[in-house]
Structures are given as structure tokens and as C-alpha cells.
Amino acid sequence: MEYFKVYRGGTLIGVEYSPDPAFVKWQERNNMIILCSKEEAEAIVSDKDGETVFLLPGKQLHGVETDLSAVLVTQAEYEEALGEIGTLPDPEDENPEIPDGTPEEEVLTRAQLTERVAELTRLVKTEAQPFTADRAYQTGEIITDGSRVYIANQVIVTGETVRPGINCTETNLAELLTALQAQHEE
């Protein structure tokens, strides 16, 4: 798997990943662009459309005029950049496309959704209590076992274990956001 940041004229515009990236270079002998190894590559072809070419740093691909470039990064750098991308202007934010059959509820733009998910993630990290049997939990308290998040639906006494469906409910994002907001209003 390869991860990379995509730039246009030096400005970060996106991130991509590919399990099997198409690295390419110019072959003088046959006057054509060919697939090659990562070490020989002058550019990467986007997996999204199979046509867009991103130049690699310091490389020029003969016959290709583009202001798009890509920098290979680690998965952690990719995920960090993905968060940055969520804060960039999105043309859909001004005029979101609402699919037919969408319920008459609030439709969020990508930027609004990214902001809410970031807020929820921050709240979970700061508010969810790691479950331990040596303490009690109050109704509505948010608990995590490290992989799942629960809301206590009754008092959980010291020594009792988390039992989804009995003393707590595994939560989805909407329920969790509501519970977290209720805790912060108290």
C-alpha cells in the first residue's frame, strides 16, 4: 500500500492511497511512457480515474505538462493530511447535491460533517471512561472497552461488568453525540 499527498502548484489539494500504484517513467528507446518500479518512477497514475498523472518531487515526465505532483507519505501522514483536507474549501459546500429520496432532515455539507466528526472524536477521547470493574458508573455515562463505546442505561455498580443490552447500550454516532452534548450542558 502506498499513500501520497497530492499538490497543485505547491498547494495541498488531496490525498490518495493505492494498494498497487502505477509508477511510470518515460522510455527514450520507444518514445513512450511505461510502467516501472517505484525507484525508477517519475510519476504516479491516479487510481481514481487511471488517467491523471502526478509528478514525483524533482521529476519531469517527458510529454506531460501538469501542475499536479505527489509526495509519498506514511499512513500516519496520510491520515493527518486527510484531516487537513477536510478543512479545505469544497465546491459542494456552497451548493450540496441532495439525492432524491433524502429524508427531510438537516443535510450536512462535507465540511460540516467533517467538523462534527472531529468534535465527536475529541469528545469521545476526553469523555469516554475506560471500563474498569472497580468503580460504579451512572446512567448516561459514556464507557469504552477500548474498541466499542457504550452508554450506561442504568447505574452499573462496582464489580459489575459491562453487559450490552442489560446495563448499557452499544452506541452509534448520533446517540453518542446526543449523550455527549447532554453531559456538557449539565
Image (tube, rainbow, N blue to C red):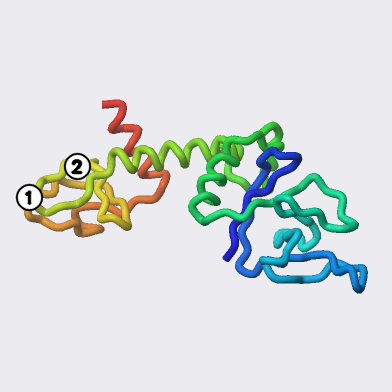
Is 115 positioned to the left or the right of 166 in the image? Answer: right
Give coordinates of residue 125: x percent, y percent.
33, 42
Q: Residue drawn 19% across and 56% down?
A: 162
Precedes in sequence: disc 2 or disc 1: 2
Quarter holding the N terminus is bottom right
Q: Residue drawn 92% across and 73% down?
A: 30
Is 1 positioned to the left or the right of 146 in the image? Answer: right
Check residue 139 in the rendering and tell me which mark sits there, or answer none: 2
In depth, the one of 31 and 103 nearer the eye is 31
Q: CA distance from mark 2 to mark 1?
A: 14 Å
* Disc 2 residue type (three-letter): Thr
Give coordinates of residue 172: x percent, y percent.
39, 50
Residue at far bottom of view: 30
Give the class, few, some or many, for how many residues have Cα within 10 Å of label 1's Cα (few <14, many ≥20).
few
Vertical arrangement, residue 14 with respect to residue 178, above or below: below
Give coordinates of residue 116: x percent, y percent.
48, 37
Q: Secondary structure at mark 2?
A: loop
Check residue 158 in the rendering and tell me which mark sits there, or answer none: 1
Q: Residue drawn 59% across and 57% down?
A: 3
Labels 2, 1: front one: 1
The answer to whether one can see residue 107 in this image is no
Is 75 positioned to the left or the right of 98 in the image? Answer: left
